[in-house]
Image (cartoon, helix red, strand yellow):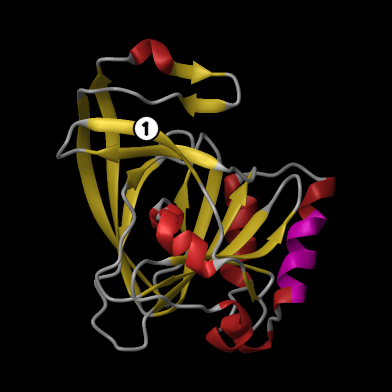
């Protein structure tokens, strides 16, 4: 196992790329992510915070993997959302978040599910989700995962520290949209995802602020 203070982003990415010659499984990638945890020092070039919303900061992406740092100020959270049927792994480099896990029970548009390449088209006006658990994730809690069986959750920064939270996310396959649920208004829709920065460079922050795109899922 590599010491997190000695693991560079480049080492992490090269390790992930080595999986592309073999079978990608949740357990194998989870063990790798746990053993190659990136420190806050290593992630500093990708740590961009905003008062208005959490930020999604792309570190690496190819046809099989997406690596991203998400930065959260106190109280910032995602909507309840899906992961488009893809695998996901998350570790915390700084701070603590709560992950609220949900299970789909029913909706009034079940025929819009199981579309090729997508988990759902959205558009329901009646939704039943069961909240299963809340998982506290921090630097000592290991790797949090999503898979095809448990793919609906919400991430919330409950940490009161002034420094904010930085989480590291790995997805396979990469995905550019997901289903966002508004349980109060009983509505769901497919949201397009965007990045606040790519490879350390902030992209169009003012435009994103006006459109609200960065308020959608991480």
Instruction: Choose between 170 and 19: the one closer to the eye.
Output: 170
Q: In screen coordinates, is 4 left or right of 124? A: right
Task: Say what secondary structure mark 1 lies in.
Answer: strand
**Residue sticking out furthest to the right:** 21
Query: In the figure, is residue 128 to the left or right of 168?
Result: left
> Residue 82 appears in which quarter of the rendering?
top left
> Magenta stretch containing residue 89, yes or no?
no
Name the magenta segment's main secondary structure: helix
**Residue nearer the viewer, 189 or 120:** 189
Nearest to the observer: residue 80 or residue 39: 80
Q: Residues within 10 Å of mark 1 (few under 14, many from 20)?
A: some
Instruction: Reply above or below: 25 against 5.
Output: above
76 w.r.t. 106: above or below: below
- Residue at 69% over, 44% down: 24
Quarter of the rendering occupied by the N terminus = bottom right
Residue 112 placement (x, y as % from top left): 42, 16
Residue 118 place in picture, x, y as percent: 54, 27
| Residue 99 locus on image (x, y percent) | 31, 57
Q: Residue at x 69, y 51 (%)?
A: 65
The spot of residue 79 in percent (x, y) is 31, 49
Residue annotated with mark 1: 189
Residue 218 in view here? no
The answer to which image quadrant residue 45 occupies is bottom right
Tell me, yes or no, whether the highlighted magenta stretch contains residue 13.
yes
**Nearest the eye: 173 or 120:** 120
Span shown in magenta: 10-18
In the displayed structure, would residue 138 be above or below residue 105? below
Which corner quadrant holds the C terminus? Answer: bottom left
Residue closest to the far top: 111
- Residue 140 in the figure: left or right of residue 9: left
């Amino acid at each position: 196992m590599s010491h997190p203070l000695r693991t560079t982003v480049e080492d992490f990415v090269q390790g992930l790329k080595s999986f592309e010659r073999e079978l990608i499984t949740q357990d194998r990638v989870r063990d790798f992510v746990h053993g190659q945890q990136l420190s806050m020092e290593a992630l500093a070039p990708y740590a961009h915070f905003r008062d208005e919303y959490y930020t999604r900061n792309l570190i690496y992406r190819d046809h099989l993997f997406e690596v991203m740092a998400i930065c959260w100020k106190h109280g910032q959270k995602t909507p309840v959302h899906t992961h488009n049927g893809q695998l996901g792994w998350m570790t915390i480099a700084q701070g603590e978040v709560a992950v609220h896990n949900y299970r789909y029970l029913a909706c009034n548009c079940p025929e819009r599910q199981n579309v090729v390449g997508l988990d759902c088209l959205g558009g329901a006006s009646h939704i039943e989700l069961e909240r299963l658990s809340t998982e506290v994730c921090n630097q000592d809690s290991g790797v949090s995962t999503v898979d095809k069986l448990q793919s609906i959750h919400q991430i919330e920064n409950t940490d009161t520290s002034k420094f904010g939270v930085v989480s590291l996310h790995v997805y396979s396959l990469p995905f550019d949209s997901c289903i966002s649920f508004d349980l109060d208004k009983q509505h769901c829709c497919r949201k397009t995802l965007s990045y606040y920065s790519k490879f350390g460079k902030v992209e169009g922050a003012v435009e994103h602020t006006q459109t609200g795109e960065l308020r959608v899922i991480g």
